[in-house]
Image (cartoon, rainbow, N blue to C red):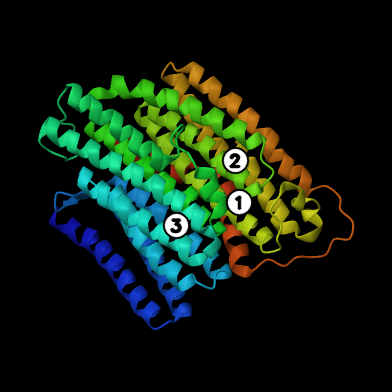
Amino acid sequence: MPSQIPDFYVLALVAALMILFSIVAAAMRKVRAQFAIAVIFMLILIARLVIMLIASDNYSALNLFSANPFSLFVSLLFTVGVLLVNILAYAKDASYSNFSLLSVFALMGMYMVAMSTSLVSIFIGLELMSIPTIFAMLLSKRVAIEASVKLFILASVAIALFSFGMVMVFGSSGSVALSGNVTTGLLALGALAVLIAALAFDSALFPFNLWVPDVYQGANTYITALIGGINKKVGFIALMQVLFLLFVAYKTTFVPIIYALAILTMFYGNLAALAQKNVKRMLAYSSIAHAGYISIGIAVATAYALGAALFQIAAHMIMFIGALAIVLFMESRNRHEINDYIGLHKENGFASFSLAIILLGLIGTPLTIGFIGKFLLFSSAVYANMLPLAIIGIINSIISVYYYFRVVSAMYSEKSGVSQMKMHRNVAFVVLACVLLTIVLGVYPNLLLGLANAAGTYLVG
C-alpha cells in the first residue's frame, strides 16, 4: 500500500500546480501561456491516470476520496473532454483566459465527484463544477444571460434537493459515507427519492430537464460542448455512486424508477428533436435522448450493464464534442439552421464528411463507437430479461434516424454559387480527433471496453 501513495498524491500535486500556474498566467494576461499550461498539464494528468489504471491503484485519502478503477476511468474521460473543449475555446473566444481558468476549477470538481467516498465530497464537487460553468457562460458571451440564469436555477434546485437528501441519509444512518449502510425505513426511502431527483437534474433526465435545450442553445457553443458532453455525464457518475454504493439495499426499489425514467427520457428527447430546425437545439434534444440510453445500463444494474453505460458515456462525450465543433465552425458564418447546411460538402468536404460520420455514430451505425455503446446497452437489457427496455431503445434509435439524416441530406444536397470555407486549425484538430476516436473505437473497442467493464465491476463489487 505505501508504494501506491505517491501515485495518488502526484496526481493531486499536478492538478494543484495546473490551477496555480493558470491563475498566475491569467493575472499576467498571458493567454497563449495559459493555453499551453492547460494543454501540457492535462496531458500530464492523462498520462498519470493511465499509469494508475495500468497499475490498478486502489487508495483512499482523508476518508473522502478514493483512487480505484471506476474513479480513475471516469477522471480520465473527463480530462480528455475538458482538454478538447479548451482547444476548441482557444480557437474562437477572445475571453479564453477566463474560460481556461474556470474550466480547470470545473475539472477539479469533476475529479472530486469521480473519486468521492462521501456525499459531502460529491456535494462539493458538483458545486465546484457547476459554478465555474455558469460564470464561463456569462463571461464568454454577454447575450447568454438568460441561459446562464436558467442553468443557475436548475443547478440551485438540484443542489438544494441533494442537500436535503444528504441530511435525510444522515438522519437515517448517522453517516454520509458511500458505504451502503443506509437502514431501511421511510426516511431512507425518502432520501433515495430526493437524491434521484437531484441527480436527475444534473443528468438531464425527464422530467427534470426543463430548460436544458434553452441553456444549450443560448450558451456559446464550446460551453454547450462542456455542459452536454461532460458536466451532464458527471451527474450520471454521481447517480451511479449514490445508487450502487449507498442504496445497494434498495436495488429493487430504484431499478423500476430508473427504468421508467430511461423510457420517458428517450422518447422525450427523440420526439422533441424531430421538430427542431436549429442544429444546436436538435443536438440538445439528442443529448437528452442519449441520457435515456445511458440510463438503461443503470436500470439493468449489472456489472456488464454499468460497463456498457460507462462506455456509452465516453462515446457520447466524444461524438457530442465533435458535432459541436462543427456547429461552432458553421455559426462563425452565421449559419444555425439545418437549411444553412445545404451544400456544405462543396464548401468544406472535411466538415460535411466528419459531421456525417459523427451523426451516423449517434444513430448507432456499425463500425462506430456509438454502435458498440448501444449494442452493449441493449444486449445487457436482454441478458437481464428486460427485453421490452431493449426494444424501446431500438425503436428510439430508429426514430433518431430521421432528424440526423435531415442534416446529412442537407449537407450533401446541391447548391449553386458555393465558395470554399476554411476551418480554424484548432477546430479542425478537435473534429479530426473526435472522428478518429469514433471510428477507431468502433472498430477496436476492446481497450476502452476493458477499462469500462473493470470500472463497472468495481462499482457493483
Numbered tag placed on residue 421 in the rendering: none
Residue type of the residue flagged with mark 1:
Ala
- Residue 14: x percent and y percent? 29, 67
Q: Please name whichever residue, 169 or 147, is drawn nearer the observer in this view of the structure.
A: 147
Give the amino acid type for the residue marked by disc 3 in the picture. Val
Q: Is residue 188 above or below residue 67?
A: above
Which residue is under mark 3? 80
Quadrant of image for the C terminus: top left
Q: How far, Cα to Cα, is label 1 from label 3?
A: 16 Å
- The residue that label 1 is drawn on is 323
Q: Return the x and y of residue 80 as percentages of the image width and height.
A: 44, 57
- In the figure, is residue 442 to the left or right of 338? left
Q: Secondary structure at mark 3?
A: helix
Which residue lies at the image location 66% right of the left edge and 59% below the top edge?
Answer: 331
Task: Report which residue position mark 2 lands on.
Answer: 362
The amino acid type of the residue labelled 2 equals Leu
Q: Which of the two labelled residues, at mark 3 and mark 2, occupies the earlier sequence position? A: 3
The spot of residue 336 in percent (x, y) is: 69, 53
Which SS class for mark 1? helix
Mark 2 Cα shell of 10 Å, populated few (<14), some (14-19), many (≥20): many
Residue 55 placement, left or right of 325: left
Disc 2 is placed on an element classified as: helix
Mark 1 or mark 3: whose residue is earlier in sequence: 3
Q: Position of residue 389 (x, y in %)?
A: 49, 21
